[in-house]
């Protein structure tokens, strides 16, 4: 398991929002909807110098939208399937915009059992989750990562 420390200032994501209250498979349903309607927000997506979106996020938060970890043993919370956008972007009708506070993260490439393995790693190394964990896809490489917040930036 390769772990990288990343400092990520506050950023915004526009996507499709749902929660664990929506039932089994809700995350895949959000991604299906977001992907099928991406053209509606493509012009808002933050891009790099080559024109690639800088990131596709499965952002998470607790039910209060405080960007705390999911509740009840990480089994209940909200999820936003979308793309990183500029701060001044306005979500079109039917879409939701979150602005996620800045954090120092431990970033790890997604692999089997990554979440429980990282929770063990955090505990064994004296880290405490300071916010909700996020899924991230690097559009250029197609690789999927999880971002584990270990320090909130003010």
Image (spheres, rainbow, N blue to C red):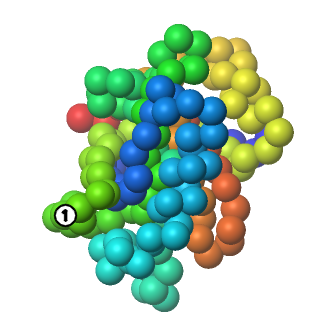
Q: Extreme bottom residue here? A: 50
Towards the viewer: 106 or 92: 92
Residue 24 point in image, percent of width and height: 63, 33
Q: Which residue is drawn at 50% across and 60% down?
A: 33
**Quadrant of the image occupied by residue 154:** top left
Q: What element carries label 1?
A: loop
Q: Residues within 10 Å of mark 1 (few under 14, many from 20)?
A: some
Horizontal side, residue 149 vs residue 121: left or right: left
Horizontal side, residue 42 vs residue 71: left or right: left
Q: Can residue 47 be seen in this view?
A: no
Vertical order, 12 against 19 (above or below): below
Towards the viewer: 66 or 40: 40
Q: Residue at x 72, y 47 (%)?
A: 110
Horizontal side, residue 85 vs residue 120: left or right: left
**Quadrant of the image occupied by residue 74:** top right
Q: Residue at x 55, y 56 (%)?
A: 31
Residue 82 point in image, percent of width and height: 44, 58
Q: Residue at x 39, y 25 (%)?
A: 62
Which residue corresponds to mark 1? Answer: 90
Towards the viewer: 76 or 124: 76
Q: Extreme front residue here? A: 23
Vertical order, 39 against 134 (above or below): below
Vertical order, 30 against 73 (above or below): below
Residue 16 point in image, percent of width and height: 41, 53
Q: Is residue 79 visible?
A: yes
Q: Split into 4 quadrants, where in the image is the N terminus? A: top right
Residue 27 point in image, percent of width and height: 57, 44
**Quadrant of the image occupied by residue 67:** top left
Instruction: Tally the marks.
Output: 1
């Amino acid at each position: 398991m390769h772990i990288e420390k990343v400092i990520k200032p506050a950023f915004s994501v526009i996507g499709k929002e749902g929660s664990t209250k929506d039932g089994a498979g809700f995350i895949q349903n959000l991604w299906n909807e977001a992907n099928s309607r991406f053209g509606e927000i493509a012009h808002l997506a933050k891009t790099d110098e080559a024109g690639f979106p800088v990131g596709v996020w499965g952002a998470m938060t607790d039910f209060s939208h405080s960007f705390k970890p999911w509740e009840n043993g990480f089994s209940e919370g909200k999820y936003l399937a979308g793309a990183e956008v500029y701060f001044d972007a306005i979500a079109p009708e039917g879409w939701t915009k979150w602005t996620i506070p800045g954090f120092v993260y431990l970033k790890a490439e997604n692999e089997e059992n990554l979440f429980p393995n990282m929770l063990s790693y955090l505990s064994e190394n004296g880290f405490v989750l300071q916010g909700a964990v996020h899924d991230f896809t690097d559009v250029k490489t197609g690789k999927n990562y999880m971002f584990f917040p270990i320090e909130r930036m003010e």
